Each structure stands twice: as C-alpha cells, then as structure tokens.
Amino acid sequence: MKPTATDRIVIRRKRAPAPPHHGGAWKIAYADYMTAMMSFFLIMWILSLIPRDDLTGIAEYFRMPLMTAIRGGPNIDTSSSVIPGASPSPIPSKHPITQPPVQNSRGMELRRDTERLENLKADLEALIDTSPVLQEFRPQLLLDMTPDGLRIQIVDRQNRPMFATGRAQVQPYMRDILRELGPVFNRLPNSITISGHTDAVQYASGERLYSNWELSADRANAARQELVAGGMEENKIKRVLGLSSSVSLVKDDPNAAVNRRISIVVLNRLAEERIDAQNAAGSSDPRFYEALQPAPVDEHLSSLPDAEAQAAGQQR
C-alpha cells in the first residue's frame, strides 16, 4: 500500500552514548607545569647575567632559616651587604664571603684625579699631533705618567737647543711651544712644578761662580714666564726647581744633548699634599716662631730714653 500525502514517515535513529566526562583537572596541571617551566628558564637566564661573586652571595642568602630571617635572632644579618643573610651564615660555608673594601670618598677622589690626568695626557697627545706649532717638535716632547703626576719634558737636540748656549734666553720656537702649552694646564685644578736640567759639561770658571745650578734654575724660571705669558694662571705653579745635571735622562752619557731639558709635572693630589706638608713642616715647629720673635729687651734699658737705651745697648 502506497503512502498517501497525509501519512507521516517517522524515522527512528539510535543516539550514540555520550563519552564519559573526565573533568578539567589536567588543564590546571598543564598550566602549572608550563608556568613552572617558564619561571625556571627565566631564573636561569637572569642567573646567567649575574657576576659570579654575586651568585655566591645569593647562595649564602638561602643558608639562613626562614624563621630566623623573619623573627630575627643571634644569626640575623647585620652586615652592609645588600643581600640579607649573606654574613654571618648560620650554616658553615666552605667558601665564606669576604666583603669587598668600601670605596670611601677619599679613594674616589684620588681615582677621579688620576682619570683627569690621563685625559689630559690624551688631550696633549692629540694637540701635539694636530697643532702646526707642536707637531714640528714632536720628537722633543716626551709625555709619561709618574708617581707625582703627568710629566711633560721638552728636551734639547744637538741641532735645535731650547736656550741660547750657556744662557737662560729662550729660543723663539721654544717660546712658541711653551705658550701653546700654557692654556692647556688651566683645564685642571692641579698645580704644576717646573724643573730645569742641564748636561754635565761644567763652566770654565767651575762651580764657584755662575754654574749649572744657577743656569738650570734660571731656565726653569724663564719657562715659567713663557707659560704665564701664554695664558697659564700664575697661581698654578707650586715649585720652580734648578736640578743642574743631578737627574740625567741618559745615564750612560751625562753630556748628551737630551739631558738639557725642561720638565713640567702636573701634580696629582697626593704629590700636592706632600709638598704642602713639607712647606708647612717648618711653620709648625715652635722653634720657627721663636726665631721670629724679637730679642727680649732689658727692663732697665726699656725705662731709659731711646737715645740712652741705644747707647747702653751698644756698650753691651
């Protein structure tokens, strides 16, 4: 029998059973795992950037028990370390931490002073290489660091002396060198010393009259005058010395031309303080003041008129 239009066809399909519900606990566990791994690799990356000495301090931090760190106790950290619990440690360590010395203001000041002198040395070398005046005399300009500071030496050459022979008259090119260097020394607050040196050739008159000692002192003072004329502040000069041939640049040949030179030392802080202490040593001696006091006047003489007191004093 054929279905008619009014008949409905009902199709029954069997529904597949739903899978059992397992819950979302695995998602939470997986998220915790990923978070822990990310934190681990982040910590490892940070530790790779920390210096080895700081890593030791971090390791010592975890040696202190948590309750001791919170509540305090005999083992609580009292050191100046930025890491709590770094020292002392309640647990003995095979590699104890030694606190680095604290850099005080004095040490920092001396370090900055050394850096200023090194920068001045670099500036002078650049000036010598670029200045038309100084570049010509580059072989006669010697720069080096000494325990007293930066030393600039202007040496003689056999065919190009700095001064007139046997005199303290500055040659024209030497005058140009000194006046070019003068303003450079104003860049730093450091004082300078100027020393004159000669060779070992003696005057015909010997050492009794005008000798290499007077000549070296006069040449050092002539160099001072040219530095000041070039623009250097006069109060920057600490000492002007004449050393004759006592400090030869070439030990094996004291008569060499390079021994005739002018040494300018830009003093560091320690050298300035040492010179100031030497200068003040005599003034701090009570005997120095006693020598300046006028001689005591006899009470009997002080009661006499001036003319009579002078006459009586001359008779004594």
Image (spheres, helix red, strand yellow):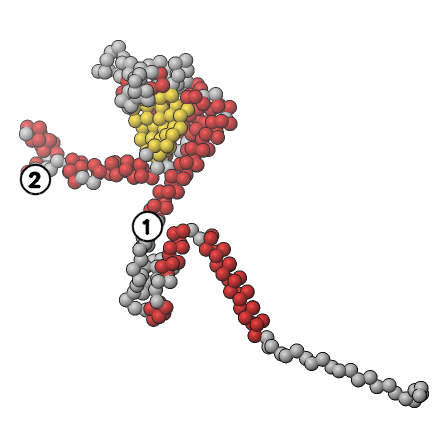
Residue 129, can we see it? yes
Closer to the N terminus: mark 2 or mark 1?
Answer: 1
Determine the secondary structure under disc 1. Answer: loop
Q: Is 273 located above or below residue 4 in the figure?
A: above
The quarter of the picture where residue 213 lies is: top left
Amino acid under label 1? Pro
What residue sits 68% from the left and 80% below the top? 18
Q: Is residue 85 left or right of residue 309?
A: right
Q: Is 144 located above or below residue 6 in the figure?
A: above
Asked whether 146 or 70 is in front, the reply is 70
* Position of the N terminus by quadrant: bottom right
Asked whether 268 or 193 is in front, the reply is 268
State the residue position of label 2: 299
**Badge number at residue 101:** 1
Q: Does the CB distance between marks 2 and 1 fall below 8 Å?
A: no
Q: Is residue 275 left or right of residue 184?
A: left
What residue sits 38% from the left and 52% below the top? 53
Determine the secondary structure under disc 2. Answer: helix
What residue sits 41% from the left and 36% below the top? 118
Badge 1 density bin: few <14, some 14–19, many ≥20, Cα 10 Å: few
What residue sits 41% from the left and 21% below the top? 140
Residue 203 image position (x, y, % from top left): 27, 12
The quarter of the picture where residue 251 lies is: top left
Amino acid under label 2? Glu
**Residue reaching furthest to the top:** 204
